[in-house]
Every structure is written in structure tokens, then in C-alpha cells.
Amino acid sequence: MHRLLAASLTVAAGALLAVGAAFGIVALLDATPEQPNTPLVHYDAPSRGQ
């Protein structure tokens, strides 16, 4: 009975660790970047009168 309890606690702890890691990864992926969203290339607008 002692081994069954230890095995079930190990499985439960592993499942909680996996769920926590999954939530942590999702939280990191949802984080907003620190750099501003500015374009690297800028094209001048064509003039209309010519």
C-alpha cells in the first residue's frame, strides 16, 4: 500500500508540474515585447502633382 501511495503522489506531482510549466510557457508567449513597433524601412509617399 505504501508503494501505491508513493506512486500516486509522484504521478500527481508530475501532472501538476506539467500543467504549471504549460501555463508558464503560455504566459511567456503572451508577454508583449519591449521594443516599439516601428518599421525598419520607410518609403516616401509619391507626390501627386507631377
Image (spheres, rainbow, N blue to C red):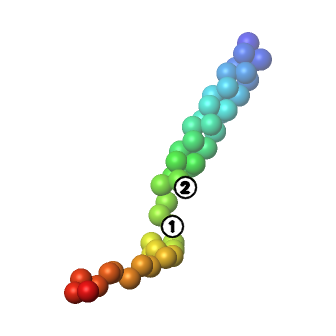
Extreme-front residue of the structure: 50
Question: Which mark identifies residue 28?
Answer: 2
For the C terminus, the quadrant is bottom left
**Dot 1: what SS?**
loop
Q: Residue at x 24, y 83 (%)?
A: 48
Extreme-left residue of the structure: 49
- Camera-nearest label, 1 or 2: 1
**Dot 2: what SS?**
helix
Which residue was labeled with disc 1? 33
Q: In the image, is residue 23 above or below residue 41?
A: above
Within-10-Å neighbours for mark 2: few <14, some 14–19, many 20+: few
Looking at the picture, how far across and down is residue 35, in whole percent? 51, 74
Q: Residue at x 56, y 49 (%)?
A: 24
Q: In the image, is residue 20 above or below residue 6?
A: below
Front residue of 22 and 44? 44
| Residue type beneath disc 2 | Leu
